Amino acid sequence: VIGCNACDKPISSGFAYACTKCRYVLHKACAQLPPTFNDPSIYHHPLTLSDMKNKDSRSRQCDVCRIRKTPGVFSYIFIKDNKYTFAACIDCCVTRIALKAEADAIKEEAKIKVQHEGHPHHTLSLQLRPAAF
């Protein structure tokens, strides 16, 4: 079983991105993680996605769940003055990222559906192509 280089979990089903030359493999979801993450409930500064290579051993422990991670797995980190300050593993962040994506999708949907006083009986939906009429 091949493990994901981002989360160290097995890739057993679903889509994955891979480099067949060096056997570097990522779950599709891991490959599509945002490069930065900002959630004040986790940390009061924006965090940057890092593979945690070349980081000291203390930084490999998640500051949220306190679980020590395998070298090379991804975490969201904050570095100030070239010093490690905070790390949150992707397991701790992925739920918050999904909730933010869902909230953003709801906000986006609100932009394409409107109630208009000229047609109060139904919601109007933005039509992106003339053939929809």
Image: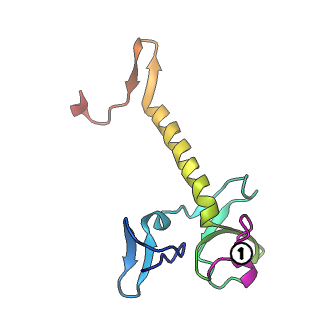
Q: Is residue 112 above or below residue 97?
A: above
Residue drawn at (43%, 73%), measured in percent from left and top?
11
Q: Is residue 82 left or right of residue 35?
A: right
The residue sitting at the left extreme is 131
Question: Mark 1, residues whose alpha carbon is within 10 Å: few (<14), some, or many (≥20)?
Answer: many
Image spot of residue 51 (x, y percent)? 59, 77
Q: Quadrant of residue 56?
A: bottom right
Q: Is residue 99 left or right of residue 116?
A: right
Q: Could you tell me which secondary element the residue under label 1 belongs to?
A: loop
Give the quadrant of the N terminus. Answer: bottom left
In the picture of the structure, the residue carrying the numbered disc 1 is: 61
Nearer-the-camera pick, 132 or 43: 43
- The chosen color scheme is rainbow
Q: Is residue 114 above or below residue 103?
A: above
Q: Quadrant of residue 60?
A: bottom right
Q: Which residues are magenta?
A: 57-70
Q: Is residue 78 left or right of residue 129?
A: right
Q: Is residue 91 above or below residue 107?
A: below
Residue drawn at (52%, 45%), measured in percent from left and top?
102
Image spot of residue 57 (x, y percent)? 72, 84
Image spot of residue 92 (x, y percent)? 64, 61
Magenta segment includes 64: yes
Image spot of residue 5 (x, y percent)? 50, 78
Residue drawn at (68%, 82%), measured in percent from left and top?
55
Residue drawn at (54%, 61%), measured in percent from left and top?
34
Q: Is residue 19 left or right of residue 83?
A: left
What secondary structure prevails in the magenta region? Answer: loop
**Amino acid at the residue labelled 1:** Gln
Magenta segment includes 82: no
Give the quadrant of the C terminus. Answer: top left
The residue sitting at the bottom extreme is 22
